[in-house]
């Protein structure tokens, strides 16, 4: 049993980390922080945890030393505190956007400010096992992943690796997302009568995760993010063009080559049924990413699809998967979670 | 007062036609048909009409002569019956897909069978006023429009007319739709526990409305249709590329040129707020189409947006707008419907 | 044409008043107030009104004199300002809870404070036409109605008037409501990820509308209010016991006696179909109240049902109905709104 | 490891049994039947199980012998086949309504037909551990529980056991339920555009589970069931009256007396927060039943609340809990499932 703590445990990613770590057989959660809720039971904030833990929030200043520190603080905060946070544990897994990009110029471009600790960018391994497993295994510091970026990256990874895409034509990633992506703070845009049943063009252009896709895949994808009626879940519909026509069995082979050994990626490409393509709702609460595709033989367009739970494979679940990798445990440890149907 | 009838009045488009025509000051609804429900009150099928009409369904065989016949029969049926249907009224407005394409070869390609009455294809005016107003004014026979095609067509029309798009790069139309697009017949895929909260890649490639976009705009757009949690409404997110950089005010001008005189198209392009881009939910029950755009100055991509109610501007509402045009009435007659907020 | 104004026009009831009054043939809306949004277009707050009005909000201090003033201010505010507000127009229709109760003691008991202007309580007619039509016709000042109280009152009115209920047994009114009842201000409880899909016991006991039911019906009903996944709409399921067994046709007669001449109350009591009982969703945006019942012959329990749109029949719609009554116009003037199906 | 099989595995309860039993450390699932889908992979029907099992459905005729047989067949079927089914395994747990009532006359009254195997009624233990644990431990045959009955029974059990309710006043159980209660077969009433956003009075009177409440509690409760927008979950709002006033701490004591040792019942009765009362959505996929109450000191009414997942604590979860009891395993074996938040 190792000792883990969570800095920033009152938000949705913090809550998911807690849910996962409380059920993880190799770890003990020794502390969870929240400034606003210090002294309160964590289960009063995360009502699903009632009966599963008696922990109370402590302020960050009272965080004890531990073996692994997870940080799920608001964007920007971990970067500003990294010198201090890194003294609290020999290993740190950050779930914010602060250490995802390895390039300070890209950070400046997409986040609109100077990175507060640029010398740390190179010390973090990008925390997507499917793209960066070996580095994570050896890392002391692992970054989080962007949920939308991850859906796009996992949809495209096999096609990009196999060099199948036509570089002369653009890649368009049209991502549909649920409301939990906006975090736990109420706002005018999250007010239920306004947010219900929207098909809201949240970020038709200029989404920050564009930079993460470029870094992971080495290609430019143009992102659009649309909010739909859903709490958890994201679907990336990625439109790209093949260099040359391919038959379905060839695409099967390409996807299998990349993913057959991956514990959390399932290929979903069936001829019929309601769930013949990846569907986020049946992945809620799990660390699965379901990927699939459709090819238009008239035009050579391939539509690559990836569904995931933005709080899990898009955040906390992948973070725990990284924890497992860093310690040499089986990757599914604490993550053997089956989704629900119907739901 | 003219006499109108609806052939095929038990489905969702038929119900919308009824709702609109019952409130239309220039028409009297003399008959509504349904084979399955002949003899029943139409309000038992369309419970929103309780108290507004005492009409009962009659079988098609009992349809009286009238001034205008609306047909909202299942796809294929009107084409097979057109010789007979055309004897019932001097003017006919069809809401099915049967007479939208003017080319029998395109029909064969997209609908997978020979058109049963190809000689009639040329007699129908395509029923989208924003693209074909003059022909509709003069027409005896007017076709319906595809809901998804209409969203794509209205989003792109200003850009295509102005010749702003780069022909070397593809157009991708990623359309999000509600469950009413599937019609009123229950099926395994419409079962509530299965259909709820989906982000379902209904037609990632190969959607039939591709042909309608080509016919109206003269360009090829690649369609993908994704079902989301919504009953009424569709949003087209159309990704295209500009030939050369344009400033926002130039795009305003282009959209205004096309739409400033249109009674049902509103330009929605605001700097802030929850509804800064077109949003289908606030259009439910109205004949409005809201259009907007976003440009990515990094890449020249323009994201053209159009929201509408698939049963209204995408079907019955546009059909009534055509009725008005054919009779020289103001286009908003019977269609002065304000949407709801919140909803 | 009379001149009307709305004090407090940025909230949901204010928005509905605007939607209705902009389409009302006998009135002109001369001003709408909002302190926070003074100077802004009302359509930027109420996006459904885009294209239908160019009005901008003014501060309350700039409200011009008019023929009828509607007030849709936060609870408590109209009562505090009533001396001033009453100088602005000869007639005033208030949509808040401030003047519903005619008894200052009841106000104190249920609202937990002294009424700021108790001498005004007797000057207001309670604004529910089905229960108080003649007084409204003659009134200069008309109060709003509580949405949940109205659903309970309309469900029970026929049974109470006919003296059919067993006074020895309690009346339980279990009301299910949508999120728009909470108003337009975002809060932790209205945050979409929290509010979605709830069956939340919002007020299992102690709901304030209890007092309005007592005042209107002269009986005590015990209210429970549960929030469900819905934006607009409320259903009252009112459990009561009959003094003696009644056949269905006797109950039909009782309900018809009360409601057959009512323009907005429909009796919904069918033997089959999805909509055999009152259903709020198909009433959204309309002023209809649908009422029905079910009797358990084993026990004598009658379940009286009423569905309505809380912002319409439960607030703004009834207020406009009162406007019509006060001016001797047909009650449906400006309120001939048909609901949607499917929705 | 014992060998278990599921007869009737293609429905929603069958799917939940599979999900639970595949993760249960003491059992091996040796067969799952479906007549319609024999030969197909179970994961094509239950897409959440992709990657977790390679089982295929077999017809009932090919069911092998096993240690425990779960039956999740349509109501009526198990009763007709019980002689045969009972030869397949020494222990049988039925999830249908067939063996819940111990009285053939009650079955006739509520199910409208003679029980096909009345001599078997007495051989089944009613499968609700909180009310019948000792009998289940010793039983060879265990019945399922009604989901709505269970919510009502668990809400009221402490109050009834402690003799606190006034017998002169009725008990009204107003239950709100999701669409999965209707099972996996599509119908006109489950069609998404119709079923969405309803507050549908599904069974205002005469619900069959009334008999189960009487059998378990020995009191008569009058049930009403209302369908709301939700897939999984039920909330019972049970209105009853106390014999004499009680303080909150006395009710705490009563609920604790009944439930403090129960592994799956949590008392939820907080002073504030969104989740201060039981809420079904955060229980989805778990075997928890959350119970709480509210007392109206003005009238003595107590509102007893119970939330649960109808497919879990209301069906498959409780069945697996019974399996554990029958084998002397800890009751939480295979059921340590934490709910999600947000969701």
Image (tube, coloured by chain):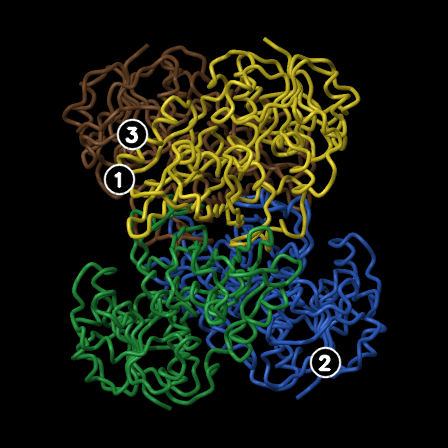
Chain colours: A green, B yellow, C brown, D blue
Q: Which residue is drawn at 69% across and 19% down?
A: B31
Residue B163 falls in image quadrant: top left
Residue C20 falls in image quadrant: top left
The residue indicated by pointer 1 is B247
Which of pointers 1 and 2 indicates the residue nearer the eye?
Answer: 1
User: Eyeballing the image, is C91 above or below B236?
Assistant: above
- Disc 1 and disc 2 on one polypeptide chain: no
Q: Marks 1 and 2, Cα distance to the nearest angstrom?
A: 66 Å
The residue indicated by pointer 3 is C99
- Disc 2 and disc 3 on one polypeptide chain: no
Residue D30, disc: 2
Residue D260 position within the rendered picture, expressed as x and y whole percent measured from the top left:
46, 75
Q: What element carries label 3?
A: loop
Q: Marks 2 and 3, Cα distance to the nearest angstrom?
A: 69 Å
Residue D168 can be seen, yes or no: no
Q: Residues within 10 Å of mark 1 (few under 14, many from 20)?
A: few
């Amino acid at each position: 049993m190792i000792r883990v703590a969570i800095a920033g445990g009152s938000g949705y990613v913090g809550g998911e980390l807690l849910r996962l770590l409380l059920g993880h057989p190799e770890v003990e959660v020794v502390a969870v922080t929240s400034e606003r809720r210090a002294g309160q039971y964590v289960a009063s904030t995360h009502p699903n945890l009632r009966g599963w833990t008696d922990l109370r929030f402590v302020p960050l200043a009272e965080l004890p030393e531990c073996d692994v520190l997870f940080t799920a603080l608001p964007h920007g905060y971990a970067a500003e505190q990294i010198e201090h946070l890194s003294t609290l544990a020999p290993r740190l897994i950050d779930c914010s956007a602060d250490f995802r990009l390895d390039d300070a110029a890209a950070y400046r471009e997409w986040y609109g400010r100077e990175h507060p600790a640029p010398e740390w960018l190179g010390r973090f391994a990008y925390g997507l096992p499917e793209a960066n497993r070996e580095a994570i295994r050896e890392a002391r510091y692992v970054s989080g992943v962007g949920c939308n970026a991850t859906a796009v990256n996992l949809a495209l990874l096999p096609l990009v690796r196999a060099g199948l895409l036509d570089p002369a034509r653009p890649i368009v990633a049209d991502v549909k997302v649920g409301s939990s992506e906006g975090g736990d703070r109420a706002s005018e845009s999250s007010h239920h009568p306004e947010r219900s049943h929207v098909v809201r063009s949240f970020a038709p252009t200029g989404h920050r995760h564009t930079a993460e896709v470029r870094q992971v895949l080495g290609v430019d994808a143009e992102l659009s993010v649309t909010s739909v009626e859903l709490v958890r879940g994201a679907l990336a519909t990625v439109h790209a063009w093949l260099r040359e026509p391919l038959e379905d069995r060839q695409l099967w082979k390409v996807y299998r080559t990349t993913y057959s050994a991956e514990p959390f990626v399932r290929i979903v490409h069936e001829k019929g049924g309601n769930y013949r393509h990846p569907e986020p709702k049946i992945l809620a609460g799990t660390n699965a990413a379901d990927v699939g595709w459709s090819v238009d033989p008239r035009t050579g367009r391939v539509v690559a699809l990836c569904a995931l739970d933005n709080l899990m494979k898009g955040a906390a679940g992948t973070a725990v998967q990284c924890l497992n990798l860093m310690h040499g445990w089986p990757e599914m440890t604490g993550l053997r979670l089956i989704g629900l149907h119907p739901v």
